[in-house]
Image (spheres, rainbow, N blue to C red):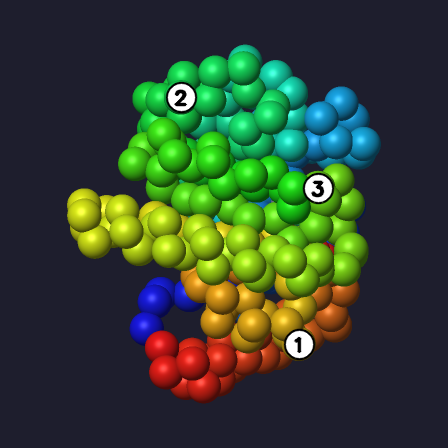
Amino acid sequence: MPDYKIAPSLLSADFARLGEEVRAVIAAGADLIHFDVMDNHYVPNLTVGPLVCEALKRHATVPIDVHLMIKPVDRIVPDFAKAGAGIISFHPEASEHIDRTIGLIRDCGCRPGLVFNPATPLDWLDHTLDKLDLVLVMGVNPGFGGQSFIPHALVKIEAVRRRIDAVQQRTGRPILLEVDGGVKVDNIGAVARAGADTFVAGSAVFGATDYPATIAAMRAAIAAAAVEGGG
Ligand code: DX5
Ligand code: ZN
């Protein structure tokens, strides 16, 4: 069975108590902290930057998974690396030179990821997958937490799974398949069955009163789906 990872998104956390929220979800079983960066340009919302990432690094005993929804990308990458990012993902539409951005993230000591919006074709993986550590499939259009999962994303996850498996068979190199947006306890099993191994959940975790119970319910739903699917 793959090593499944739960990545709570701070977008739905209490922004007045972010350090405490980070510690709470890690104590509840989070494997990654998902950190959404929005610029009111690439997406119609504005969140936080490297200063906040750096401040939270002291509280984060698991890797920080930075999701850049910003354009341009390159200028700010080294700042997030210095601020303690473990993974840095970006959207191909937001970079003029995708291969250069992937190399920059790697050269800064972070793991590079490429993000696919619901209507973004997977062709962008043709010449990049060998250099990526993570592929992120959006279950919603980026910009806001609390939106509903777009069912067609499941087909996309299956297609990315096939591409990643082919690379892994050839190289043995692990590549995470992460899904972000609209993931809840009641659909995380289907997302896992489609082939995801890393699950971002914002409102489903931070909107719950009991973080450990919610993360445990997600893991149970993933395990049940794996048994059903024979995986
Ligand atoms: C959306 C963000 C997501 C968001 C997910 O643009 O990238 O990470 O926080 O929130 P939920 O899980 O509530 O859909
Ligand atoms: Zn995100």
Instruction: Name the quadrant of the C terminus.
Output: bottom left
- Mark 1 or mark 3: which comes first in sequence? 3
- Would you place residue 168 above or below residue 197 in this image? above
Q: Secondary structure at mark 1?
A: loop
Q: Residue at x 70, y 50 (%)?
A: 140
* Label 1 sits on residue: 186
Residue type at mark 3: give it: Pro
Residue type at mark 2: give it: Asp
* Label 3 sits on residue: 142
Q: Is 72 placed left or right of 167 in the picture? A: right
- Would you place residue 88 above or below residue 20 in this image? above
The answer to whether the beta carbon of the residue marked 3 is less than 8 Å from any atom of ligand 1 is yes
Q: Secondary structure at mark 3?
A: loop
Residue type at mark 1: give it: Asp
Foreground disc of the pair 1, 2: 2
Q: Residue at x 51, y 56 (%)?
A: 157
x and y, in percent, of residue 213 in the image: 61, 78
Q: Is 5 placed left or right of 231 in the picture? A: right
Distance between the alpha carbons at the discs numbered 1 and 3: 21 Å
* Label 2 sits on residue: 99
Q: Secondary structure at mark 2?
A: helix
